[in-house]
Image (tube, coloured by chain):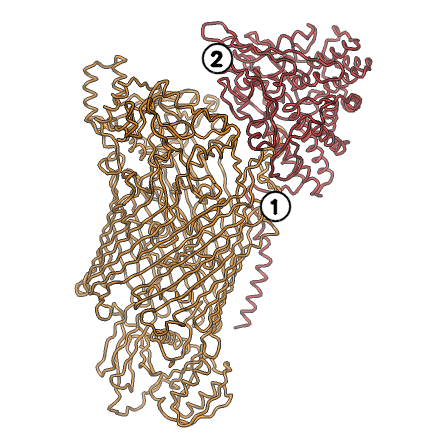
Amino acid sequence: MYKNSTRNWWAPPAYTHKLLLIMKLTVLILVAALMQVSAATFGQKLTLKGKNVSVEKVFKAISEQTGYDVIVFTSRFKTSQLIDIDFRDTPLSDVIKALISGTGMTFTIDDKTVIIKEKAPGVPAPKIPDPAVITVTGKVVNEDGSPLAGATVIVKGKSRGVLTNGEGNFTLLDVEEKATLVISFTGYEPIEIQATREPKTVRLKIKVASLDEVVVTNGYQKIERRKLTSAITSVKAADITNPAFFTIDQALEGRIPGLFVLNNSGDIGVSPKIRVRGTSTILGNRDPIWVVDGVVVNDPVGIDPSTINDLDFVNRLGNAISGLKPYDIDQIDVLKDASATALYGVRAANGVIVITTKKGKIGEPVINFDQSTTLTKRPRYTDNNIRLMNSRQRVDYSKDIINSGLEYSGNINYVGYEGALNNLYTGKITYDQFQAQVSQMETMNTDWFGTILKDAISTQNNISVSGGSNKMTYYASVGAATQRGTVRGDKTDQFTALVKLSASLTPRLTWDMTLRGNNQKSDYVAGSVNALSYAYNTSRAVPAFNEDGSLSYYQKFSAGATSASYYKFNILNEMQHSRDLINTSGINLLTDLNVKVSSHLNGTVLLSYGNNNSNDQTVYEENTFYAASLRRSEYGTPAPTTSLMPFGGELKSNQVRNDSYLVRGQLNYDRPIGATSRDNLNVTLGGEISSNTYKGYNIDRRGYLPDRGETYAAIDPVKYPSYAQWANLSDMDIVRDELTNLASAYFSSSYTINDKYIVNFNTRTDFSNKFGSRAKEKFLPTWSVSGRWDIDKDFFKNSESVNMLALKASYGFQGNMLDNQTPNLIIKQGAVDPITQAYYSNIAYYPNPNLKWEKNKEVNIGLDFGFFNNKVQGTVNYFNKTTSDAFLSKEVADINGVPSYVVNSGTVKNRGIEVTLSFTPINNLGPNGKKGGFTWRIDPQLGQVINKLLARSVNSQNVGESNANVYNNYLTGSQIIDGKASNTFYSYHFTGLDHLTGLPTFANNDPSMADKYKGMTLDEVVKEVMVPSGNRVPTVQGGILNVFSYRQFSFSFNMTYSLGSKVRLQKLYSNTVNGIVSSTVSAPLPENNVNLDFVNRWRKPGDEAHTIIPALVGGAAYANTLNLWSTGQSYQYADNIWQMYDNSDARVASGNYLKLRTLNLRYNLSDALTRRLRIKQTSVMFSATNVHTWASKKLEGQDPEQAGFGDNTQLSPRSTYSITLDVSF
Amino acid sequence: MRKAFIYIGIWCMAFTLTGCKKFLEEQSQDLAYADTWQKMDEVMQGEVYMKHFTTPPSTSFKESGTAVYFPWLNAMDDDITEFVSAPYYIDNRDDVFGFYTWQSNPCVDKTFLPYVDDTWPKVYKSINAANIMIYQAGQLHDNPEQLKRIRGEALFLRAYYYFYLVNTYAQAYNKQTAKTDMGVPLKTTEFVEDKFFTRSTVDSVYQQMLVDLDASEKCLTGLTPSSIYYANVDAVNLLQSRIYLYMQSWEEAITAADKVIARRPTLSSLTNYKPLTSFFSRDNPEAIFNEGGNAMVYLMGDGLTKSFQASPALMNLYETSDLRRTAYFETDAAGKVRYTKMYRSRANNVFPTEIFSDNYFLRNAEAYLNKAEAASMLGRTADANAAVNTLRQSRFDPSTFVPVNYSGAQLVSFVRDERRRELCFEGHRWFDLKRYAVNTAYPFTTTIVHNYSDVSYGASPFLKASLVLQPGDPDYLVPIPLDAITFNQGALKQNPARQNRTF
């Protein structure tokens, strides 16, 4: 642990240094009083000589020679008396003894401080009236009026002082009238008062941390901001949370430069993707690791890297911190450079986010109640980002299709206009009935958004108690959050509890204990129902309800492997009976015992245990369309023998239990060095072992009867052979059992020279039980060196305008090895061969003897500054991170028996600039920092990451079966391309609509190219037909926070911005996605709604001059468009022109945006009012999120974060409005 | 106090050091190193041997693709012809359409849309697994006896797979040109080679097979095979005799065949054949070795109205008293002469739980035929006639059996026909046709005609195309998969272009 450096008590003094010293004294005095450490153990020797010098001067000289401070805690020892001295190589203790001999004083020496005090706190000496001196009495209290025991009261400029007693009272004798008293208490702003005869009550304010004074923690150490050598950004949770954020990761957007947040869904319970300083690995996990109170926390359900790295993966299972309420969080430190993360070893290559939970404060119990209610708005047809037809437009559109002579295939759903028409043609209805039905349809305007979605009201409720004494502080909180999604029925209820105790057991022993628990129940519509996509894509001429209010069903086509049929369908019925229930619960215990071995050395022993359970159950009941399709009969009619699910419904369950523990021992050594103590050595040495287990199983069962005691129907395999075959293949429980053990040692040391220059070295090594780690290369060192130069202390010593200026630099190295790549053959053990009755195994990983470490090197240069009375403060960081020998999966000739293997031939480069600024243009705080004046603070932030990927060996070797994936990888940005940034995506180059047919045309997409393409690899062909469109991940993200306060009001808003990314517009032809063609017309199916863009479509030659929306085609002309000529060739680069159109450069838009992300307006009830109500503090806050987004016009209202890469429509980030009441008793 | 800390420190260190080893022991749910001979044996079962076959799912060998190697090998020769009688939604010819009709790219469906044939990568996967096992057997020392056996099995299998590769994708072994003819890429290293592969010559592939088989023979000699699912010395010698036969090294072919016959003389007497059973079985005294699946049971499945049957040319070779007519074939209700060496029938409700391989069921009958052919080519008429007669004796009822006694060209021709009668649909005929054409003595060529018909409801079948394969046609070489050619960027040469036979 770092400590404040000791400075000469009388040294010419920046005011702040004195304050720091006083703070330290408080601690020292407490310790000294309790410990009685013998002074003899210290062997400082002095040479002093002088005649008629004041004792005070002698003390000053002692201090200069030894670095020891001398403090007198009594008024009976006059430091002004003049004496003669002559000491030569005399031990310090002897010098002091001589000085105080005969005064009845005693002294102690501890931690570089000599304390002189009365032998026994006896009767005060008889008062000698002196007109110049007075006795000052008073009481020290905190803002709430509770007394502060142990506060220091010192006469300014003198080495005299007292501590307040248990009631906060103090008495200071013999003070010169009008002298200044300095009153201080750890964690509070010190205050100066004038000594007067009247008793005084002094109210201390809790210290508000500014950019300069924050103590940052990296999980292992607490470091003062001004001693920091690495790139760490710290924020207080209270400054960034908003009632609409149910987990802290959502609140980080635009608040940490260099940390990019990518929201791919506005749904509840979806964890955003986070990237710290770009993408630095290709095959490994790209997420940062989370640390809570010093312990790395794991995902409740381990998900493999390729899934978690997929930008289109919507993670509802939650991440490591899903169980932690933002309310319970005190501070977040984001460790960015190699020096900051070195103590976490190889796992930390993607950054570390350290969360510190709240702890109790000394004082009377404070009960805080915090309640917020949040309204989340659902999408509406009137929203400017919804461009869908109403039912009249839709019916007209259908008429247009029919009148154009376009035909559907046989397997469409006969609903809407087409349904009525079909009934007319087949004689089921008369023409009059048809007319009536059509006119009814035209005005139907089913509100699908209103039917499927709703405005959701969520709440967060928290109660906490905190307080404590010198011996023990406590913080306990319970929270309940009820989160409701905009999809009807989607909800998450979360209950959390946190208890934190900090106790000083003995003067040498302190103990911290934290217990966290959480339980979360989520209930969603099963993902396969795609309720949201249905709301977006369903025609408003299709009814949701009958006139009598019952659900309106239509016959929906179900394609089976060998049979096809129609079953009745209504989305509401489907939603109600197809549920995905996710239940997670966790408990975490942490205890930390700290022993002070000596004044310079302390040791900690930390134990942590965590248990997380997660159960994800998907149930389809027997009355759903899903069940009917499997049963192959309508609900209520007997199943045929070909049925895949003759009775009941389906239950899929995935259960995971995660256990982890950690034991850590750590020694901290901190010692000032040199005569003036301006040097300092700090060493931390530690070791830890941690273990993490995932156990679980997956089941998939049919015949489930949830309403009949949750039993299963017995199904006769002989009668239902199809079911039996399915059961044989799929009805197998998959058991999961993973154990990761890690033993690690780490070392950190820093040396401060002359209080201005700091040099730091960190290193760590891990040993793990991971299977297939290379035995010889298990030693994976991670190390960093960093330094800091406080320029202001050299060049701007007395400057008014430059308050702080410091240069930081760091360099770090991490070596990384991939699992399962060894010089040995690794096999996957299988079951028993049915014929030979012998066990069999398969080759899991070929030997890879030549694989080397992936090397990650990072340079960081930063400048911390504070100008003009700290009205302008900030940090600028430049970083350059290079991953060389990066692992790449390389395709090799199939003659090797494997399609690909891992080589070290990638280079990933990330560099960028991060800027954090804080301006306080107006600061009219009232006297003593009282509320009242007008203040305005503006904090702009900028984080830039430029990513580049050099892949030496990707020699375009993608051929054969993986074709479909490869060109899709180009389209979705997951292909690794030499010289391009990762996540660069490609698009077909749209060259306008054909003059004669109105069909889209694309560059270099012509059968005449066949000869040319034949000899080319797919990658070469792709580069002919596609053009790079840009990157899915922005290069710059940041935010601008504005805070205004005036009297009882405070108002803040944060604008976040993102630059440099590109997105696709939502697909127009989703019915031809991935070659699954569900229609025989390039038009939507009867039940689908249509984008308003289609109104402007090509209708006649010449239209191509002013529209890029293709014509409608059907029948043979349409069928011809479905098989692109390159299909089946080794260089196939597309499915068909409709898929090409959706993925063309004409449908790419800029993803840049400026968003009014959060807005808070808070009103604090006046002190007078709160006192009358007998409460300590009350505030009411109105807040909003995602209020408005400014983005490219081409998006036509589509949210720039709602990229049209995936097949399903995802909810755009929603606007929310909240009201919060916060009361402290 | 300080002492106490030192003691605690020492205790902690001691605890950590002793506990560490166990704590950091590598752990995985299902992964392991192949560091014992037992685990190597498991890998042999899982990766080097072809998959065994149980109840086939339904109507296409593609549903069990991983078990079936070179499934189209019997679809190209003159023993097979189509059978079309009535429309049906399943057309069993689809799986091998492009091979049956000798398309320029045989991996196309009946609409000429190409698909990716997995044979090439699958065989190389097995070869590489064998490479690793051969290497690994030299690295381990836990049980030298067993490791030697495993090494012998892996060497045999590597040669076996190269035999099929080189004869499918390259020219038959031609004594004059084998040293320059393009064979297939030879890869015998145990590690991944990141390079563009070229084709080794036919001769070097053959030499590699001989080297491997010699080494394998040394490893396996004297061991008693535990079952027909493990490679054994009889299989090694049988393959040796086959390879020498292909190389026209007649003496060596006889020597190797004699080794098999000496140890395994017993033939299966077809007089004991029971109807509705498989000739291929575990108990067949001829059985030496079996691995992999069976495509023939699909291609000639019973009751199917659009599939294949044995060609009249083949059936006409059998004398009426030849018991193989009924043991190897059956005429189903629709009039189709179908393959039944592996008997599976819907009509008779026979669904065996174990399906023996079509092409990879090695048996000693071949040794007699190899010997007979080599002897006849050398002019050792007596030896040749003796070998043929020994075989034929077990294929006829004693009452009807008449020994043969031919010589010269007549003998060669009779032995070749006998080979066809005996080994039909076991993956021999196509290769035999290729090598007969390059035999220095008694070369033989023939013209093959494959008809392709279709049928509509209520109408009789009509001929859509009649395809002819002339002697020396480039279509005798199966093209190397396009993926492999493209991937290796010119280093890997394709076979001469084949005819366009689209219709």
Which residue, given by chain and number where applicable, does mark 1 sit on? Answer: A850
**Where residue A318 sits in the image (x, y, percent)?**
39, 45
Q: Colour of chain A?
A: orange
Please, what is the three-letter code of the amino acid marked with disc 1? Answer: Asn
Quarter of the picture containing the N terminus of chain A is bottom left
Local packing at callout 2 (Cα closer than 10 Å; few below 14, some 14-19, many 20+) is some
**Where residue A906 sits in the image (x, y, percent)?**
52, 45
Q: What's the residue at 60%, 17% (across, down)?
A: B75
Does A933 appear above or below A833? Answer: below
The image quadrant of residue A51 is: bottom left
Q: Nearer the viewer, residue A1207 or B262?
A: A1207
Q: Is residue A806 left or right of residue A1178?
A: right
Q: Is residue B350 visible?
A: no
Please count the marks in the image: 2
Does A505 appear above or below A51? Answer: above
Q: Nearer the viewer, residue A902 or A462?
A: A902
Q: Nearer the viewer, residue A606 or A44?
A: A44
Q: Is residue A756 visible?
A: yes
Subunit under mark 1: A
- Who's red, chain-wise? B
Q: Nearer the viewer, residue A521 or A222?
A: A222
Please, what is the three-letter code of the amino acid marked with disc 2? Answer: Tyr
Nearest-to-viewer mark from 2 and 1 = 1
Spatial separation of the CA atoms under disc 2 and disc 1: 56 Å
Subunit under mark 2: B
Q: Secondary structure at mark 2?
A: loop
